[in-house]
Amino acid sequence: MYQSISQKKTRWLRYSIFAILIVSCIACSPAPKDPSLSPSSQLLPGQEIWKHGISSFLFGTNDTHEWSAQNFETRPAIQKSLRNAGFTLIRSFFQNGASDSDIKQRIRAIENSGAHCLGIIDNIFNGTYDKHLVQYLGSRCLMYEFGNEPDLSGISIAAYLKHWNSLIPVLRHINPAAKFIGPVVSQGNTEFIQGFLTGVKTSHVLPDAISFHWYPCSQDSETTCLSKADTAGKIAMRVRALVKNVLGKDLPIGITEWNFDPSNPPPAYDEDKNFMNSFTKTALQSMMQANVAFACQFDAASYAGYGHLDMFDQNGHPKAQYYTIKALIALYIPS
């Protein structure tokens, strides 16, 4: 829609003031880390340790299935905004059976954003395609999650382990530099994680990192939802303790999908700038305190949750959550 110069100036001024307030608020209260927690010494490809021991890969986002023609992949302006803000990691859904041109479009969008790639091996049962995906991407993508929320897809722990144990060694042979991550469960499903860890301890096909998803709210009020914003780090600490208990060692922990509510559609909390700023800041600081190694907000711009989970609106304009994460990146990135 056409906007007058006056409207554009008003919009720019409003978001500039909002961004300044975010930076001021965040700078007053950086999140100190619990000194009793020892982060994993294993860095993922491209990962850096920023100020206060914060992992650079905490500042990621998702490129999920596209529900609108106006999305992260088709809008260079969104890619440029992510690059300018300093987003470091983009998790991309490389769909089962996608053409090479589709794969190329996704990886180019990631590269245009200046971020590292975290690819999703969409179908763990299609080894032929999965091997082609890892071979085709080569050095352009060096991190992969094996499946996506198998616990919600009706895949048993036994079935997941069977395909993990048979396929991961093959994929590692195809790309020895790549890292492979599991079990990618919903809501920090510790029962599935424990079963997975027990299985890989027996098979000796260990993951390079452990990942799960976190959406704390379910049609809650804004106040109730905000009170749950610090639970991300608490779940991560439980997962880390489980890893150490079962494997006797530490592994990087990642929260590769996170936002306020997974409902479809969720409440329109994205329209409340103060809520999104507080929720996002609290969530990420709880991850910092728990030494989470990588995290990806859900999502950039795919019309997820009818657009309410997107960081950019359908016109490609950044929303409140984008500005909060951008301010946190500026606070922790080395000069």
Image (cartoon, rainbow, N blue to C red):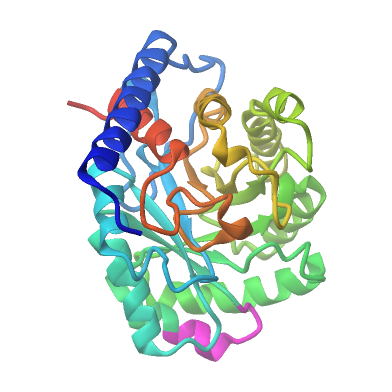
Task: Look at the picture and state if 74 lies above or below 45.
Answer: below
Out of 245 and 63, give the one closest to the viewer.
Answer: 63
Q: Residue at x 42, y 47 (%)?
A: 60
Out of 148 and 82, give the one closest to the viewer.
Answer: 82
Q: Is residue 84 left or right of residue 102?
A: left
Q: Quadrant of residue 110?
A: bottom left
Q: How many marks?
A: 0
Q: Quadrant of residue 300?
A: bottom left
Whether residue 182 is visible, yes or no, is no
Could you tell me which quadrant the C terminus lies in? top left
Across and down, in percent, residue 143 comes to 42, 61
Q: Is residue 125 left or right of residue 115?
A: right
As for residue 112 lying within the magenta part, the answer is no
- In the displayed orientation, state which residue is furthest to the left: 335
Task: Look at the picture and state if 69 lies above or below 72.
Answer: below
Q: Residue at x 30, y 54 (%)?
A: 115
Of helix, strand and loop, which mostly describes the magenta segment?
helix
Task: Look at the picture and state if 300 lies above or below 49.
Answer: below
Out of 326 and 244, give the one closest to the viewer.
Answer: 326
Whether residue 245 is visible, yes or no, is yes
Out of 200 and 118, give the one closest to the viewer.
Answer: 118
Q: Residue at x 55, y 83 (%)?
A: 96
Across and down, in percent, residue 167 comes to 58, 78
As for residue 128 lying within the magenta part, the answer is yes
Across and down, in percent, residue 289 comes to 53, 22
Q: Residue at x 64, y 25 (%)?
A: 230
Across and down, in percent, residue 69 comes to 44, 74
Q: Which residues are magenta?
A: 123-132
